[in-house]
Amino acid sequence: MQPKVDIKAYAFNLKDVRLLAGSPFKNAMDKDAAYLLSIDEKRLLHRFYLNAGLPTQGDVYGGWESEGLSGHTLGHYLSACAMMYASTGEKKFKNKIDTTINELEKCQIARKSGYIGAIPNEDSIFYKVSKGIIKSSGFDLNGGWSPWYTVHKVMAGLLDAYLYADNKKALTLVSKMADWTGVILKNLDENQLQAMLKCEYGGMNDLLANLYSVTGNKKYLELSYAFYDDFVMEPLSKRIDPLPGKHSNTNVPKAIGSARQYELTANESDKTIASFFWETMVHHHTYVIGGNSNYEYCGDADKLNDRLSDNTCETCNTYNMLKLTRHLHAWNPSSSYIDYYEKALYNHILASQHPENGMMCYFVPLRMGTKKTFSDEYQTFTCCVGSGMENHSKYAEGIYSEGSDGSLYVNLFIPSVLNWKTKKLSIIQETKYPESDKLNFTIHSSKLNSFTFHIRKPWWAKNGYSLKINGASQHQVTESNGIIDITRVWHDGDKIELVLPMTIYSESMPDNADRVSFLYGPIVLAGMLGDTMPNPVYGVPVLLTDNKNITEWMHPVPNESLAFEMKGIGKPFDIKLKPFYKTYKEYYSVYWDYFTSHQWQTRHDEYENEKRIQKEIEDKTIDFFRIGEMQPERDHKLTASERSYVSDALGINGREARENHYFAFEMKVDPAIQAGNSLLLTYIGDDKDRKFDIKVNDRVIANEEWNGGSTGKFYNKTYPLPVDITKDNVVIVVRIEANYGKTAGRVFGVRTIRN
């Protein structure tokens, strides 16, 4: 279906753009391609076969594929292979797609309903939904983990297999799944739909609108509006920010769906939802790298200073924000959209991949003195591994756009070749950007062509630029919306040279002018802190200076590209900085605090006091349990229910239990101590809104309501142990139970101590 609104800039087909060798994007794409080819699609199909009553053909993969979100990776995998096929022309990806689609067809035929899936207990989950029996919360629908989210990933993968790899069977399969969706929802009233939509549902609105655009079947467009919730989308339509306290990646896809619906209907409310969401997220909830969220959630607008942790910036969020940005740029081409896009692409998406082995980050942490953690090849398969497969397959999609008036937009400066079929010409972009500030474009055409060449002028290019055409300097150049416009008749061999001088500059936190990050052009710089995690209080360098003119104490490192070093202001030591996307082995800081001499002494005194308190605790310790580590958990005979998980913060493991689950373990006590024993548990300020029972030998000794504290800081809480429990025992059993519909923990350390 043709759009009903004025699209001013259309994306080129991925197959019409090829990346050239030598850029970090080409390296990332090559590493991703190798990873995709290493994956056995029959193992990803394991639970699809199982749920369809067919023989399996390989063991199920680990991570989320062997848990409640099983099946989501296959959808991402289909999308990634399809886009990689379009981006490279490599038939191995087409073969993998065709094989997978053929197997999914067998599953759909066996199921007889049109549905294809791998979710545990999916038949029961969706049968109840169809009957209006709905028990729903943020990530739970009738006992299933975000089932519509997984359905969306599978359907999106099928549609991408059709769009990018011309697999017509995939379109048949996804259409039947959409018909099944309609059957499930057809008898629900508005209240029941809204109850269902309280559970994350991915981009179902976007997928169904796209299916309508491909098939022309209006029932899919109408069905897309069934996925419209009144607790996020309705406020957005009224330009009210609903994001504080909300799960970020649950909500970005909703705005993408509204953007697509607007294009197909011209509904102004849909436009408002999409555009206001983008403005709100980018300008009020986004960190310097272009990512958003802390522990997957948004906080209050413009309040980021106390939200730096090892779990900032979930990568899926930015994957989706880039999708939304491309829609808005198509409506109104502007440098502001691509400035954000470029920042997020370099400093979050590219930075989320290990450049040697292609593995991905779930979170891209921004705590001072942190380190990136990358996925395992076959035992992780989180959401960000799935979206990561796609991220690095499609770097070509945003580089160029074709104007509705026959013009060309150059959005990104990535070495590439564009095959512009409607003009019957090609354009070669050669550059070492951002390591060089020079861009070169060469036009190859068998005939004369008259059109406007639009080149983005980045917002940071405040020192101007120089432009040459065929070696001749251009002094009278038109600009609009931050875009350089060059209109002329173009000949074969014409060359454009654009130089965009870069400078180093700082960007402050919106709520703290004394906490800054450093950038060079579009590139966020990270300070290298070595291979050992620095102490978070004293060992992370700060900036001890009243002089905030960074050009006086930050200088380029001679003979090193994009490397800078501080001189004389770093405490306890000066540091060297390099691009964040090149940081993957060492500890680093992206944000830095300015301190006066008095403030620095206070920080030092705080560190010494913490050491003294810790020494006192260690002297009183009877037993210490490093929870979350394999051997200590065995030594303390830990048992846990299914939804008890280990995660780390500041390099220390912790354990939690989700709603209605638990973990338990043994601890030594000393019955001879007349003053008694106490249990000491360590929490972190990042965790909030937790409520749980602490039991000892089956007796509740405390009902903990943990509402958090300062981000990145650990807190010890002591619970006296009843003497009648310890007087005849040398070992007790501690049990942490999530009995109040909230998470229990995380607990980062356990001690029994003498009172």
Image (cartoon, rainbow, N blue to C red):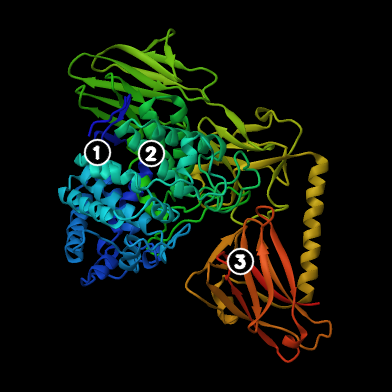
Residue farthest along the top direction in this orientation = 476
Q: Which residue occupies 27% across, 64% down?
A: 45
Q: Which quarter of the figure has residue 599? A: top right
Q: Are marks 1 and 3 in contact (CB under 8 Å)?
A: no
Residue 630 relative to residue 35: left or right: right
Q: Which mark is residue 213?
A: 1
Disc 2: which residue: 258
> Which quadrant does the C terminus fall into?
bottom right
Give the amino acid at mark 2: Ser
Task: Tell me which numbered mark, 2 or 1, is placed earlier along the sequence.
Answer: 1
Give the amino acid at mark 3: Gly
Location of residue 60 in the rendering, given as x and y in whole percent from the top left corner: 32, 68
Residue 271 relative to residue 246: left or right: left
Residue 462 can be seen in this image? yes
Residue 323 can be seen in this image? no
Disc number lying in front (1 or 3): 1
Q: Are marks 2 and 3 in contact (CB under 8 Å)?
A: no
Disc 2 crowd rating (10 Å Cα; few below 14, some 14-19, many 20+) is many
Q: Which residue occupies 55% across, 40% down?
A: 285
Location of residue 701 in the rendering, given as x and y in whole percent from the top left corner: 70, 77
Disc 3: which residue: 745
